[in-house]
Image (cartoon, helix red, strand yellow):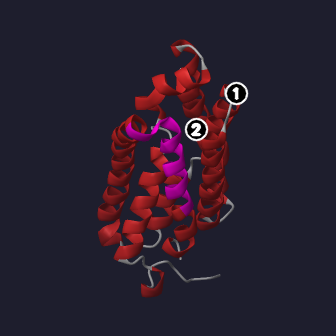
Amino acid sequence: MNTATADTATDHLSRAQEYALAVTVAVVTANAYYIHPIIGEVAASFAVSEARIGIVPALNQLALALGIFLLLPLGDRYSNRTLCILFVTLQSIFMLGMALARDFALFTAASTLLGFVTIAPYLIPAFASKRVAPARLGQVTALLTVGVIFGILVARVGAGVVAERFGWRAVYWCAFAVMAAVTLALPLAMK
């Protein structure tokens, strides 16, 4: 039986990794909230009613719940690191799909799929909990939770500011750029 544990010094996360994971959680959580302040502008762009555009955030959140139910248990069989890298990569692809979508159906499909694969905010705390000293578990959990809240707040405020100045598509292009950077940095943050 293997008696190695995550309590060895080489398995502990550095402070830089902890902060990188908090940023990752913020960025991937933000994706579901960009639509909120710009929903009217997106509706007008696709020439759909305000009632119909409401399906975009609703399907995103339903897909998120389904993804948590169906995909999160994969963490019992596969490495949280591997799953995070996979699902953050998929989020980047679907974010690009939202930025490029030229019709409402494609935009809605990309948003829904993005919601389905947004499970990294739930996998990262499990990953981190195995790689921090027990005395720091509460601090790291708090840091990751602040990342979630920060991501929501910045997405709501930032999307409105960017869309007002550059249009709603710029919000999704910026989000894709940030997601691409996180996707590239994640393997190092979860080393």
**Looking at the image, is 36 positioned above or below residue 148?**
above
User: Label 2: which residue?
Assistant: 64
Query: What number is the disc on residue 167?
Result: none
54 or 39, which is in the foreground? Answer: 39
**Looking at the image, is 159 positioned above or below residue 76?**
above
Looking at the rendered structure, the secondary structure element under dot 1 is: helix
Q: Is residue 67 visible to the viewer in this orientation of the structure?
A: no
Please name the residue shown 64% across and 33% down the image: 107
Front label number (1 vs 2) = 1
Q: Report x, y in % for residue 35.
A: 48, 33
Q: Report x, y in % for residue 8.
A: 45, 85
Magenta span of residues: 165-180
Mark 2, other Cα within 10 Å: few <14 / some 14–19 / many ≥20: many
User: Label 1: which residue?
Assistant: 105
Q: Is residue 147 visible to the viewer in this orientation of the structure?
A: yes
Count of number-bearing discs: 2
